[in-house]
Image (cartoon, helix red, strand yellow):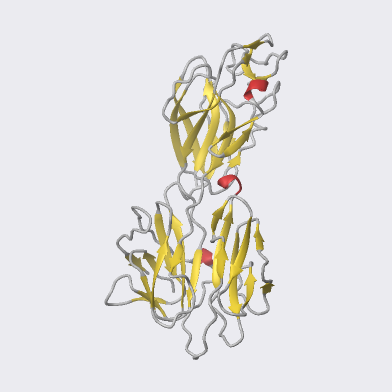
């Protein structure tokens, strides 16, 4: 049985209980899952403290070295990274060592010590998203124009604007440019290296933003239409005005990314005409996967690079920390993203008849298949502020 609840008030826990939570926000990927078990012993034997993680579970854009620690004297920590509950037969963490996490991984751990009952299981998910979850789209099979040249090598087929033969100078443009935290590598000079009037397939992934690097030519190109199609067949249309590559007009939604000091003319010579490459960001529909983007059907709207990105929401944490307690605890899931928070409680959960929001559980069984778990949303005005609770079964 799964009870879905919009988080509102602290959760009363009076029996061994596992609470799991995710955070969801507009224009963010869903957070990693936070899980914590609150255990109440009945045998009279003290229970070992639950292991803690450092750094805290969450989303990172590089590999992490995770250390586990425990406050119980003489405790040995056992852990798993394959989704199974740890036992004394699992991997043992040698004191002073760490676990290297280079891809999204959930670590579960218990502490075992003589004279103590085994601790509750600690669970932490580390989401590793290289380059803050961004990726550059490979345009090699879509290049259909010559936009970059070198001195002595005039651009073919009209150059960047398709008419004059002028092109960006590879020397002053550079091999790459950074926009929205993502490094874009430009195509090869003196070859097909730009895209115009094409429908470009996008790599699969949970991205929330579409990035484009390009410019207009022969004057500003007003109200250009970009059509994004999602894997479910739905679409989003974005309208953007592009400044001419020779003259930035600072249109809304437009950022100057790089400003080369000169260009290559149609005769191959270098001319001291400053130009620009602009960056544009379109927010995709959260929860959907973009399949393609159709660029404007306009040769005077040309692009040198396309990318996708968007960071996930912060993973919720629990207060007090999951662990063993001798009395009922009031548990508060907390998220630090300006966001919606989803909270779910494992296994059998019942609503207290007298108080909405006071959740109790009679078991500490973990849900083994997280894909089948339930969720609902609650809007947060700012971190740590609790909204009204809504519950459904």
The picture places residue 96, in percent across and down from the top left corner, at 67, 68
Residue 107 found in image quarter: bottom right
Query: Relative to the observer, which residue lies in front, 10 or 364?
Result: 10
Residue sitting nearer the eye, 325 or 277: 325
| Along the line of sight, the residue nearer the viewer: 308 or 299 | 308
Name the residue furthest right: 152
- Indicate the quadrant containing the N terminus: top left, top right, bottom left or bottom right: bottom left
Task: Tell me what residue is drawn at x 60 percent, y 57 percent.
Answer: 104
**Residue 184 in sight here:** yes
| Residue found at the very far bottom of the displayed protein | 44
Q: Position of residue 26 (x, y in %)?
A: 42, 48
Tell me which corner region of the image, top left, top right, bottom left or bottom right, holds residue 74: bottom right
- Asked if residue 201 lies left or right of residue 14, the reply is right
> Disc count in the image?
0
Q: Quadrant of the C terminus?
A: bottom left
In the figure, 131 relative to 140: above or below?
A: below
Return the residue found at the far top. 267
The vertical placement of 314 against 323, above or below, is above
Residue at image coords 54%, 49%: 206
Q: Residue furthest left?
A: 354
200 w.r.t. 166: above or below: below
Looking at the picture, how far across and down is residue 106, in whole percent? 59, 64
**Residue at x 65% of width, y 80% of height:** 88
Location of residue 242 in the rendering, given as x and y in whole percent from the top left corner:
47, 24
At 54% from the left and 22% from the top, the residue drawn is: 276
* 216 lies left or right of 149: left
Residue 146 in view: no
Foreground of the two, 122 or 218: 122
Q: Is residue 270 above or below residue 201?
A: above
């Amino acid at each position: 049985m799964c009870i879905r609840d919009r988080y509102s008030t602290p959760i009363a826990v009076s029996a061994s209980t596992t609470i799991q939570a995710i955070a969801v926000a507009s224009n963010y990927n869903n957070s990693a899952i936070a899980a914590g078990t609150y255990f109440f012993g009945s045998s009279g034997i003290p229970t070992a403290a639950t292991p803690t993680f450092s750094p805290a579970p969450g989303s990172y854009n590089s590999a992490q070295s995770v250390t586990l620690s425990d406050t119980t004297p003489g405790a040995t920590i056992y852990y798993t990274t394959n989704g199974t509950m740890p036992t004394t037969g699992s991997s043992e963490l040698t004191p002073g060592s760490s676990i290297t996490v280079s891809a999204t991984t959930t670590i579960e751990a218990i502490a075992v010590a003589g004279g103590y009952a085994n601790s509750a299981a600690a669970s932490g998910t580390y989401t590793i998203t290289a380059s803050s979850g961004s990726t550059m789209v490979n345009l090699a099979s879509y290049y259909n124009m010559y936009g970059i040249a070198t001195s002595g090598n005039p651009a073919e087929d009209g150059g960047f604007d398709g008419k004059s033969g002028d092109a960006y100078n590879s020397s002053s443009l550079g091999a790459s440019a950074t926009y929205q935290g993502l490094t874009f590598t430009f195509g090869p000079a003196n070859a097909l290296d730009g895209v115009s009037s094409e429908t470009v397939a996008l790599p699969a992934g949970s991205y929330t933003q579409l990035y484009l690097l390009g410019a207009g030519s022969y004057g500003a190109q007003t109200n250009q239409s970009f059509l994004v199609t999602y894997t479910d067949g739905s679409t989003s249309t974005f309208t953007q005005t592009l400044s001419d590559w020779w003259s930035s007009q600072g249109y809304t939604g437009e950022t100057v990314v790089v400003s080369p000091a000169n260009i290559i003319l149609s005769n191959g010579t270098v001319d001291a005409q400053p130009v620009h490459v602009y960056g544009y960001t379109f927010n995709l529909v959260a929860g959907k996967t973009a399949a393609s983007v159709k660029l404007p059907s306009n040769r005077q709207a040309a692009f040198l690079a396309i990318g996708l990105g968007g960071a996930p929401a912060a993973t919720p944490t629990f207060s007090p920390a999951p662990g063993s307690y001798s009395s009922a605890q009031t548990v508060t899931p907390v998220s630090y993203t300006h966001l919606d928070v989803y909270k779910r409680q494992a296994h059998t959960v019942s609503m207290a008849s007298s108080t909405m929001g006071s959740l109790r559980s009679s078991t500490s069984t973990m849900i083994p298949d997280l894909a089948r778990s339930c969720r609902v949303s609650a809007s947060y005005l700012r971190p740590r502020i609790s909204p009204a609770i809504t519950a459904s079964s």
